[in-house]
Amino acid sequence: MTRHTTDIETIDSMPRGGPDASWLDRHLQTSRPEYLDRDDVPSRRKQKIAAYLDRAGERTGHHDYNAQLVVEQLFGIPNPRVLELGAGHGGLSARVLDLHPTAEVTVTDLDPASVADIEAGPLGHCPRATAEVVDATAIDAPDDSYDLVVFAMSFHHLPPSAAYRAIAEGTRVGKKLLVIDLKRPPAIVMALAFLLFLPAAVFLLTQSSPSAVAPVLHDAYISLLRSYSTSAFIALVAAADPTIAVEFLAARRQAAVVYTKL
Ligand SMILES: C[S@@+](CC[C@H](N)C(=O)[O-])C[C@H]1O[C@@H](n2cnc3c(N)ncnc32)[C@H](O)[C@@H]1O
């Protein structure tokens, strides 16, 4: 584990590629919101995107893989209390409950429609699960309420000015905060990915209904541009509280960061 300090005034303007981002990297970012973040997008459309993400998580094995990362952090805790932030569809929490027979999970999202869908689904009937609307940057819970807080594939939705608050809040209400998110590729790879992405996008748009595929493609590319680099994850925690320790887990094609308040 390592400790770092960052000038808090610089965090709001920090590039997604971190304080040391190259010229190209600084140009490969955007403040454009995803469909999932927009208040003017109907809930039904957002729910379709969430359902697509859930299916993709199942097919690619991401839910299982991420649930395993969560369960490893619960080792040795008899009846662990877990808070999932930005759960969207709740697929990750469902897997955690499958893998860990005594874990209790509070499944949350900022979007009330997502939480209502989670409550109406299988998690709503599970005695070890509770669903709530929670803003990751202002969590309404006492200090140390949870053994682990997990924020999966959602951290990039927050600009740096909010992301560091989510780290402070997650480590306040939980003993540990596990952030799992897109791994920001090197700038040159992102630039090339955009060139490859265009023909793939055109192909996908011709294969199914454009209104169904376009928002998912849009959000996928915006997510990549908004992903944080390793140095950004470090700068964010230093702005949140320099006494929080940061550890990068070896994770398949993803960033997996454990923040622990010492
Ligand atoms: C891409 S989805 C991720 C869903 C799910 N965790 C997954 O792994 O597929 C991002 C989610 O983050 C949520 N979100 C965005 N800002 C948030 C915030 N400040 N607090 C909590 N959730 C937030 C959105 O509502 C959305 O459901």
Image: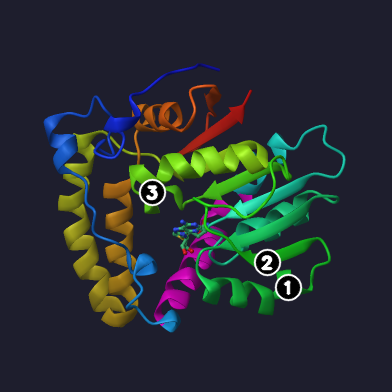
Location of the N terminus by quadrant is top right
Distance between mark 1 and mark 2 Cα atoms: 7 Å
**Mark 2 lies on residue:** 131
Residue 174 placement: quadrant:
top right
**Mark 3 lies on residue:** 156
- Report whether 243 appears left or right of 193: right
Which stretch did the figure color magenta?
45-64
Where does residue 56 sit, x and y in percent of width and height?
A: 49, 62
Mark seen at residue 202: none
Is residue 70 or residue 164 the one in the foreground?
Answer: 164
- Report whether 29 appears left or right of 139: left
Local crowd size for mark 3, using a 10 Å CA cut-off: few (<14), some (14–19), many (≥20): many
Q: Main structural element of the magenta stretch: helix, strand or loop?
A: helix
Give the vertical position of 52 relative to 237 (above or below): below
> Element type at marker 1?
helix
In reply to whether residue 189 is colored magenta, the answer given is: no
> Element type at marker 3?
helix
Amino acid at dot 2: Ala
- Report whether 140 appears left or right of 111: right
Amino acid at dot 1: Gly
Distance between mark 1 and mark 3 Cα atoms: 27 Å
| Callout 1: CB less than 8 Å from ligand 1 | no
Looking at marks 2 and 3 on the same chain, the residue that comes earlier in the sequence is marked by: 2
Looking at marks 1 and 3 on the same chain, the residue that comes earlier in the sequence is marked by: 1
Where does residue 85 sit, x and y in percent of width and height?
A: 57, 54
Residue located at (48% from left, 69% from top)? 50
Amino acid at dot 3: His
> Element type at marker 2?
strand
Disc 1 to disc 2: CB gap under 8 Å: yes
**Mark 1 lies on residue:** 124
Report whether residue 70 is seen.
no
Distance between mark 2 and mark 3 Cα atoms: 22 Å
